[in-house]
């Protein structure tokens, strides 16, 4: 699901794709359905290589491919999966206002450390002291997407970052929906990825390669057309944390 700067009415059908690049960067694509009474920010903590600077995250517009996750799903037969397992890790420094980029229909910013949230508009910050309650996020950076109020499906958001965990794929699934960090949370997630060395007993592999059911040239190099995809479903009350999955880059 993710972390929100204000309380939301509902969020569901979260879908996340992850892939590592051989240069040590990781791609993430994120989409969901959300209902909120006011403009809010979605905050995704990410394990960025320390000292990477304010340009570490590269945002990628996928508004021209709003059906990307629907197409991914076409590659999989009906399947019931298991669910279990996870991870956790945010930090400090202020200065001038952070850069805001237009990415498709979103405004997006990269926040290098937890202390840098003071450089964002107040509406788009989490309650003060939130990250102090989560010491495992010390050293993390944060991708922030500013969302409009209302009830709607958010078109896919995508970005890449220099990963501090290059041998593992990071899925941002920590929930903070009401300003509080709960031990367990209700999951409604479908995770997708490409990579080598995955435990295939825990993931469903697509019978065909991505080019057979997706328009991969619209993904701007994020999804590899000649590779299979893997899928895992997380649902119900689970430990409230992010997920790390052991997987090597594929070329």
Image: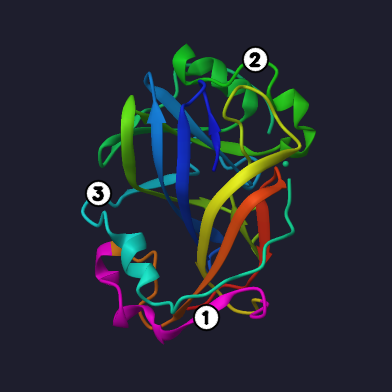
Provide residue 233's location: percent of width, then percent of height. Answer: 56, 63
Q: Which residue is mark 2?
A: 128
Q: Which residue is mark 3?
A: 63
> Closer to the camera: disc 3 or disc 1?
1
Provide residue 190's location: percent of width, then percent of height. Answer: 51, 59
Q: On residue 205, which mark appears? A: 1
Residue 165: name its quadrant. bottom right
Provide residue 245's location: percent of width, then percent of height. Answer: 66, 64
Q: Is residue 230 magenta?
A: no
User: Where is 53 relative to 204, above or below?
Assistant: above
Q: Is residue 95 visible?
A: no
Provide residue 240's location: percent of width, then percent of height. Answer: 70, 42
Q: Is residue 65 left or right of residue 181?
A: left
Answer with mark 2 or mark 1, whichever residue precedes in sequence.
2
Disc 3 to disc 1, C-alpha distance: 27 Å
Q: Is residue 101 left or right of residue 46?
A: left
Determine the secondary structure under disc 3: loop
Q: Is residue 49 visible?
A: yes
Mark 2 closeness class: few <14, some 14–19, many ≥20 residues within 10 Å:
few
Q: Which residues are magenta?
A: 199-218
Mark 1 closeness class: few <14, some 14–19, many ≥20 residues within 10 Å:
many
Q: On residue 7, which mark appears? A: none
């Amino acid at each position: 699901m993710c972390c929100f700067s204000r309380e939301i009415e509902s969020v569901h059908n979260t879908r996340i794709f992850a892939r590592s690049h051989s240069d040590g960067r990781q791609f993430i694509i994120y989409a969901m359905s959300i209902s909120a009474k006011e403009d809010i920010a979605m905050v995704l903590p990410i394990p960025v290589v320390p000292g990477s600077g304010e340009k570490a995250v590269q945002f990628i517009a996928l508004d021209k491919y709003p059906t990307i996750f629907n197409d991914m799903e076409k590659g999989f037969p009906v399947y019931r999966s298991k669910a279990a397992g996870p991870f956790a890790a945010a930090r400090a420094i202020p200065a001038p206002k952070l850069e805001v980029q237009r990415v498709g229909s979103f405004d997006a910013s990269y926040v290098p450390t937890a202390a840098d949230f003071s450089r964002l508009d107040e509406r788009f910050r989490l309650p003060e002291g939130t990250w102090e309650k989560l010491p495992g996020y010390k050293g993390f950076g944060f991708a922030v997407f500013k969302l409009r109020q209302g009830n709607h499906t958010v078109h896919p958001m995508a970005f890449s970052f220099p990963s501090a965990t290059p041998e593992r794929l990071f899925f941002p699934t920590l929930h903070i929906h009401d300003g509080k960090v709960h031990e367990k949370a209700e999951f409604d997630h479908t995770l997708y990825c490409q990579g080598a060395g995955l435990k295939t007993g825990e993931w469903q592999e697509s019978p065909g390669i991505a080019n057979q059911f997706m328009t991969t040239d619209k993904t701007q190099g994020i999804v590899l057309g000649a590779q299979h995809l893997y899928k895992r479903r997380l649902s119900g009350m689970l430990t409230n944390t992010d997920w790390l999955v052991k997987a090597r880059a594929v070329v």
